[in-house]
Amino acid sequence: MVKRFVGALAAVAVGFVVGASPALAAQGFSLFGDATRVHAGNHSHTAIQLRSAGAGFGGIDYAVPAGMTFSQLQNLSTDFMFTAASCGQGSPRFQVNIDGRNAFVYIGPPPNYTGCPTDVWLNTVNLATPASFIDTSQLSGGTFYDTFAAADLKYGNDVITGIQLVADAGFFFGTQTVLIDNTMINATLFTYEGRGHGDDESVAAAVEAP
């Protein structure tokens, strides 16, 4: 089911690769679609709510260092809590932008990435270990159940141009809502704390881990 869905979302997912705003580079991340800051987070003041209602979607677009290659992606994790529906249909997921396409890292228990509980904070643990799965089927020579170790042999020198965290399975669940907090990309921790109102609240609290 997940594999069939990913083929259907390919055109939409590629669209998420482009259009990063100047604010993203300055702030560390930006929100798109139905994504808002909410209170409280996981042992924190703030989390990001991603909501997919019907055909809608919500996501977080992260800035990555210029020239970062796939082999340099060593740590990818986040805290998450579902408040409506569950994981499934390839959502939520990290999208790693490579060569104008996406590799997908799904959140939820493999191999089907379904059955996440509601109303409890969980952590994905590191999803970028050598044995972790990554869906590289959009890339040349890719496969749905690739491992990071195998993908590194094929794409290790390819430049990563962006990373997103997306929820978009409302078409299946009706409404899918997940809270996101304490996201790690390599040594950078995104806590999503900030000040302001409306769109200004997307200012990141991104700190380098010791």
Image: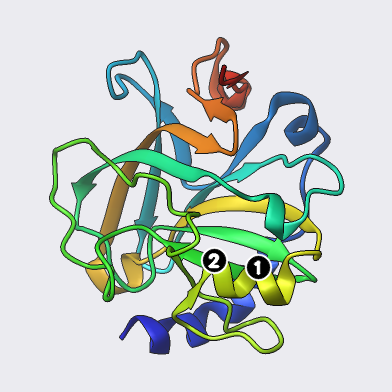
Q: Residue sitting at 63 percent across and 60 percent down?
A: 96
**Residue 152, label in figure:** 1
Query: Is mark 2 in CB contact (under 8 Å) with mark 1?
Result: yes
Three-letter residue code for mark 2:
Phe
The residue at the point 47 percent across, 41 percent down is 35
Seen from the viewer's position, the closer of residues 19 and 156 is 156
Residue at screen point 73% across, 42% down: 64
Rendered image: mark on residue 144: none
Residue 139 occupies quadrant: bottom right
Q: Is residue 121 visible?
A: yes
Q: For mark 2, what is the residue?
A: 148
| Residue furthest top as drawn | 195
Q: Give the distance between the C-alpha atoms of the residues marked 2 and 1, in whole angstroms.
A: 6 Å
Q: Is residue 17 above or below residue 68?
A: below
Left or right: residue 146 compared with residue 70:
left
What x and y, as percent, mark residue 74?
A: 58, 48
Residue 206 position (above or below residue 159): above
